[in-house]
Image: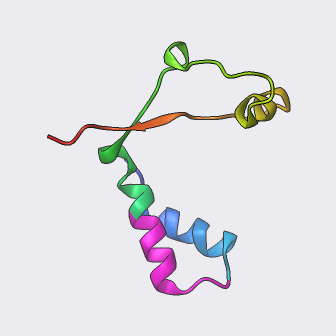
Amino acid sequence: MLDREKIVAVLRRRFPGSASYQVAAAANAIVGLEDEWEEIPAAEVIPCSESCYLAQGLAHGERLRVLRSRTVE
């Protein structure tokens, strides 16, 4: 479970000029990710060509998480 207060603290440090309502909205969105999104396991991710933005990032050592929206019933 994500700690909303820690997320708010990180957002305030990362974006010091942001208004309180913007930080609150961003924190709410991040905390809500678990309910609305699911991570796609690496085995299910379709590889893209070398010109793909994601492939370039991976080649430079970036770590990526691929998420998809859950179906709301």
Residue at the far top in the pictured view: 43
Q: Quadrant of residue 51?
A: top right
Residue at 48% across / 68% down in the picture?
26
Q: Is residue 30 above or below residue 39?
A: below
Q: Main secondary structure of the magenta part?
A: helix
57 vs 10, left or right, is right
Residue at figure coordinates x 67%, y 22% from the top left: 48
* Residue 54 appears in view: yes
Residue 4: name its quadrant: bottom left
Q: In this view of the protein, which residue sits in the foreground, 19 or 66? A: 66
Residue 45 is situated, as x and y percent measured from the top left of the image, at: 54, 20
Q: Percent x, y for residue 11?
A: 59, 69
Q: Which residues are magenta?
A: 17-28
Q: Position of residue 66 (x, y in %)?
A: 54, 33
| Residue under the image location 45 percent in, 83 percent down | 21
Whether residue 20 sits left or right of residue 31 in the image: it is right
Residue ranking furthest to the left: 73
| Quarter containing the C terminus | top left
Residue 44 counted in the magenta span = no
- Residue at 20 percent across and 42 percent down: it is 72
